[in-house]
Image (cartoon, rainbow, N blue to C red):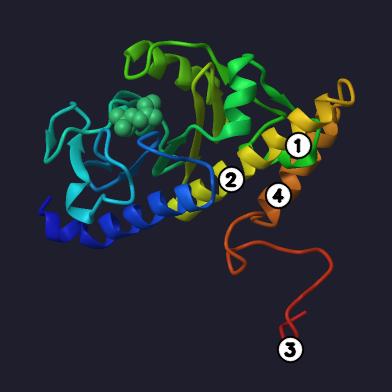
Amino acid sequence: MAASDTQALRREMVDICRRMNASGINQGTAGNLSVRTGDGFLITPSSMPYETMTPEDIVEMDFDGTYVGRRPSSEWRFHRDILRRRDDIDVVLHCHSVYATTLACHHKRIPAFHYMVGVAGGNDIRCAGYATFGTQALSDNALTALEGRLACLLGQHGQIALGKTLEAALWLAIEVETLSRLYVQALTLGDPPVLPDDEMERVIGQMRRMSYGLAPDAEGVNDIARPRGGAG
Ligand code: 13P
């Protein structure tokens, strides 16, 4: 694919990366981002601070691991494997946000201590086992932890958030960080109670019906309100 065909997407990726840092969920050369394109994916280059990264620095990769441009993120394997395995998402975002990584340093998953855990698609946010960064073993562990989920923690490393869009993945990563912070804080008062599975099923059903957390004009219903002048 010619670089000019992906220019808008490259610009959007740079914007999302800078917003990752501005929101406080990432810093330095940590973190990486990828987006599916027609026949492969675009991914951030390795070891480049987002402040200096330009759309031209974004790397184009095929699913066979070949690339055009700069050296791709050291984590291209998990980006590639997740995008290949999960056709329900088009974006993979990884960062070392402080509270999520604090839990991951203890290999703690986030249980349903708060209903918003449901935004990751289940009744917990798992923590993947540790493996050296950039390895196939880390990718395999991440895929296991992400089964049926849109986010996971990475043992002694950070977090991964998935999305259909760049905005959705950034939103979810910030939510995971907020939940992690809340959980660390809740743990200071003892083990918080956990919502039962049937309640989490209701929560997740409600989130799906309302397209909860997606753009306010996304498809979805709200039981109570309806637009003024609308039918029904
Ligand atoms: P890259 O700069 O190679 O993407 O690495 C950052 C990182 O977070 C590794 O896990």
Q: Position of residue 64 (x, y in %)?
A: 18, 26
Q: Which mark is residue 207?
A: 4
Amino acid under label 2? Ile
Q: Is residue 50 visible?
A: yes
Query: Considering only vertical position in the picture, is 74 above or below 225?
Result: above
> For the residue labelled by badge 3, is the local secondary structure a helix, a strand or a loop?
loop
The one of 147 and 101 positioned closer to us in this rendering: 101
Cβ of mark 4 under 8 A from ligand 1 = no
- Tell me the mark number nearer the camera, choosing from 3 and 4: 4
Amino acid under label 1? Leu
Tell me what residue is drawn at x 50 percent, y 48 percent: 170
Tell me what residue is drawn at x 42 percent, y 33 percent: 86
Name the residue that disc number 2 marks: 174
Q: CA distance from mark 2 to mark 3?
A: 35 Å
Query: Considering only vertical position in the picture, is 4 above or below 111?
Result: below
Tell me what residue is drawn at x 67 percent, y 32 percent: 122
Q: CA distance from mark 1 to mark 2?
A: 12 Å
- Tell me the mark number nearer the camera, choosing from 1 and 3: 1
Marks 1 and 3 close (CB-CB < 8 Å): no
Q: Which mark is residue 182?
A: 1
Cβ of mark 1 under 8 A from ligand 1 = no
Marks 1 and 2 close (CB-CB < 8 Å): no
